[in-house]
Amino acid sequence: MSILVDSSVWIDYFRGTGRADTLDLLIEENLVVVNDLILAELLPPLLVRKNDKVAALLRRITRQTMNIQWDEIITFQTLCLKNGINGVGIPDLIIAQNTLQGQLKLMTNNKHFHQLSQPIGLELL
């Protein structure tokens, strides 16, 4: 099973903190995927800092195709609110939806994903 790695994990990875060893292993095993939303969060700061090498490496990772289903996003947000989970942004819901659509696991440090994993059936690493 492939693992969608959220920007929160990548940011820690670039800083040399977090679960760098785990991510290194997943990369070596070719299990890591990204999507365009995560790349849109990560690439601009790298490009501004002229960190072209890292940006190029990220662009070579397999991209999970995104097919946003807005009715499903509305359902997810409704489930969150019914379960007292407030403040989940639309980008996080899109990443959750993309994870489920691709039958992926999500690697994240974002508390919102941990909160919404139960109501929507999101599988976390």
Image (tube, grey):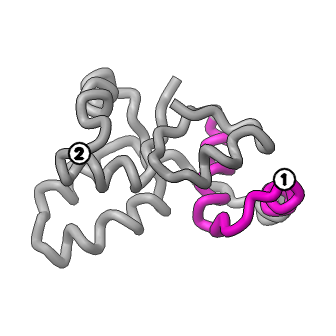
Q: Is residue 103 left or right of residue 72?
A: left
Q: What mark, if any, has residue 83 been given in the picture?
A: 1
Q: What mark, if any, has residue 66 been given in the picture?
A: none
Q: Residue at 64% across / 50% down in the picture?
A: 96
Q: Which residues are magenta?
A: 75-102
According to the picture, the residue beneath numbered tag 2 turns out to be 17
Residue 55: x %, y % from top left = 21, 59
Residue 39: x %, y % from top left = 39, 60
Q: Is residue 94 magenta?
A: yes
Instruction: Spot the residue most to the front.
Output: 84
Work out whether residue 55 or residue 49 is closer to the camera in this orientation and state it.
Answer: 49
Choose top left, top right, bottom left or bottom right for residue 40. Answer: bottom left
Amino acid found under the numbered disc labelled 1: Asn
Task: Count all numbered tags in the image, as a single digit.
Answer: 2
Q: Main secondary structure of the magenta part?
A: helix
Residue 106: x %, y % from top left = 53, 39
Amino acid found under the numbered disc labelled 2: Thr
Choose top left, top right, bottom left or bottom right for residue 28. Answer: top left
Q: Is residue 14 left or right of residue 34?
A: left
Residue 26: x %, y % from top left = 33, 27
Spatial CA span between label 2 and label 1: 32 Å
Work out whether residue 70 or residue 45 is closer to the camera in this orientation and state it.
Answer: 45
In the image, residue 7 above or below residue 109: below
Q: Residue at 45% across / 47% down in the picture?
A: 109
